[in-house]
Image (cartoon, rainbow, N blue to C red):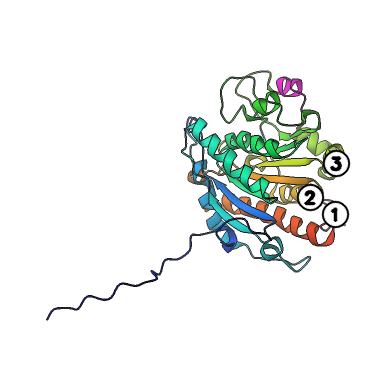
Amino acid sequence: MTRKASSPRLAPGFAKPATWLGAPFGGVGLDTKAAIVGIPFDCGTHPDRIGSRMGPAAIRVQSSNLRRFDPRSNLDVLSTLGLVDLGDVLVTPGLIDESFASIEAAIGAAVAAGTVAVTMGGDGAVSLPQLRALANHRAEVCLVHIDAHTDAYPIQGYNTATGFRHAAQEGLIDVARSFHIGVRGPTLVPGVFEFCRGLGYNLITMTDLRSLGYEAMAARVVETIGARPVYLCFDMDFYDPSVAPGVCTPTWGGCTAAEGLAFVEMLQPLETAVFDVNTVSPPHDAVGMTAFLAATTMWTFLAGLAAKLTAGHPPRVSLEPH
């Protein structure tokens, strides 16, 4: 018996691509106040921890462990912000010039549309083209870089260690009002701290941060920057490897998950134009915990942004006992 061929389906049953917390996949619309952007790029030069090019995919997967509602405000964070997932920038790991141009164009389009770009690296090298894009559309841009490393080293080339050196030397940011926070651990070359301060940056080591306190540090940053547009960069190795092992350059002595998430909320008064969470390396992660914490860091920022846009200010956050 000859089996009759079935008729072709006019509407193939393809599922939509996995997006961050199920946000709609597509372009920026009139109601879009924030947009997710993946940047699956790394330089591929680390001797043994290559893998942050896979970070955006892992963060999207782990975002399924989150929920849409903020119980403090009962806001649906996604609908309040009209959040969309724009997908991934078209990049090729290791090809810096072409990839940087693609990143700059993609982030520039999002910024020009008036939306807050919430980006997922990728390694720390993705910051420079994002800053170039922001500086093309906004004046007096300030950097708040939360990281175990300055990424402003006195070495040559375009890589994970030099992005913020180039940003300062290219005049992309107001360096005197920009901060590197949480710096600690051994360095690749000598004179890193002195060189960073010589560029004009405010350098706050992890020891300084603990001595001053998270709330006081956040207040200092907010007062210094005021209403200027901010590129807020959160490298996941700011967290201690005990809570975020899957990063490119793990460094002991970092913050706890509670401290890091609270610090993001304390910085909510800033006029953040781009919030970049980077350096998740899935091959070095443990059961997806770093990617989950990265997704939660993004959610924390977005929940604060939703509360800020609807009620003026998010709930006050403190690490002190009540």
Q: Give the SS element for disc 2.
A: loop
Amino acid beneath label 1? Pro
In the figure, 114 relative to 176: above or below? Answer: below
Residue 39 is a magenta residue: no
In the figure, 221 relative to 200: above or below? Answer: below
Q: Quadrant of residue 162?
A: top right
Label 1: which residue?
A: 321
Which percent across, then down, holds residue 311? 83, 61
Q: Are marks 1 and 3 in contact (CB under 8 Å)?
A: no
User: If you read the primary sequence from the N terminus, does the residue marked by circle 1 or circle 3 appear first?
Assistant: 3
In the figure, 248 relative to 60: above or below? Answer: above
Q: Specify start and end residues of the magenta stretch as a single range.
A: 193-202
How far, Cα to Cα, is label 2 from label 1? 21 Å
* Residue 242 in sight in this render: no
Sort mark 1 into few (<14), some (14-19) or many (20+) by Cα contacts within 10 Å: few
How far, Cα to Cα, is label 2 from label 3? 12 Å
- Closer to the observer: label 1 or label 3? 3
How far, Cα to Cα, is label 1 from label 3? 28 Å
Label 2: which residue?
A: 268
Label 3: which residue?
A: 226
Sort mark 3 into few (<14), some (14-19) or many (20+) by Cα contacts within 10 Å: some
Q: Give the SS element for disc 1.
A: loop
Amino acid beneath label 2? Gln
